[in-house]
Amino acid sequence: MNERNKIVTPLLAVDAVILFAGGIVLIKRDNPPFAGSYALPGGFVEVGETVEAAAAREALEETDLVIELQGLVGIYSNPTRDPRGHVVSVAFLARGSGVLLAGSDARYAKVFLLESLPPLAFDHDEIIRDALSLAKAKLKKKLVSVTEQSN
């Protein structure tokens, strides 16, 4: 028996914090776990696919938006973050373009203002907090760069 066949590893997923129309895009999950709950667009990485490509594919499938990745938010690996088992998620900050429309396993997709985010599935509240910190840092860096160029 091949040694590789004995290896058991976590599943790999992606999540995208999509900034769009002045808010954050969330989907209402159609399937368990957390069916009927809001979540970030995302899903499992397919064999042979990069995490970046998976994030873009999942966003398109679930929201009909084309996304431009802005940066890596983080890797979320708590073994209890998903009731189906150990799932590691690579989360990205992204900007969306197009017309928002729910698809695949999303009941619907909606833009929420930061002040009115609903309760979220999985650990997506933590991912959003981290993504907003990243977005603020990127904005601050951009402002410093513009200020330095004008001096």
Image (cartoon, grey):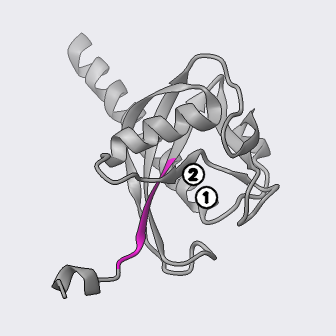
Q: Are marks 2 and 1 in contact (CB under 8 Å)?
A: yes
On screen, residue 69 versus residue 82, left or right, reads left
Q: Is residue 151 visible?
A: no
- Residue at 53 percent of width and 56 percent of height: 127
- Does residue 94 lie above or below 123 as drawn? above
Q: Secondary structure at mark 2?
A: helix
On screen, residue 119 versus residue 59, left or right, reads right
Residue range highlighted in magenta: 9-15
Q: Residue furthest left?
A: 2
- Residue at 49 percent of width and 28 percent of height: 95
- Does residue 1 lie above or below 55 as drawn? below
Q: Position of residue 51 (x, y in %)?
A: 35, 48
Q: Residue furthest top?
A: 150
Quarter of the rendering occupied by the C terminus: top left
Q: Quadrant of residue 27?
A: top right
Per the image, the residue denoted by label 2 is: 128
Per the image, the residue denoted by label 1 is: 124
Residue 11 colored in magenta in the image? yes
Q: Position of residue 89 (x, y in %)?
A: 45, 61
Pick whichever, 106 or 147, lies toward us. 106
Q: Quadrant of residue 17?
A: top right
Q: Secondary structure at mark 1?
A: helix
Q: Position of residue 115 (x, y in %)?
A: 75, 43
Specify the principal SS of the magenta part: strand
On screen, residue 47 versus residue 117, left or right, reads left
Quarter of the rendering occupied by the N terminus: bottom left
Pointer 2 local density, CA inside 10 Å: few below 14, some 14–19, many at least 20: many
Q: Is residue 59 visible?
A: yes
On screen, residue 49 versus residue 111, left or right, reads left
Pick whichever, 105 or 20, lies toward us. 105
For badge 2, the amino acid type reads Ile
Q: Select label 2 or label 1 by which is in front.
A: 1
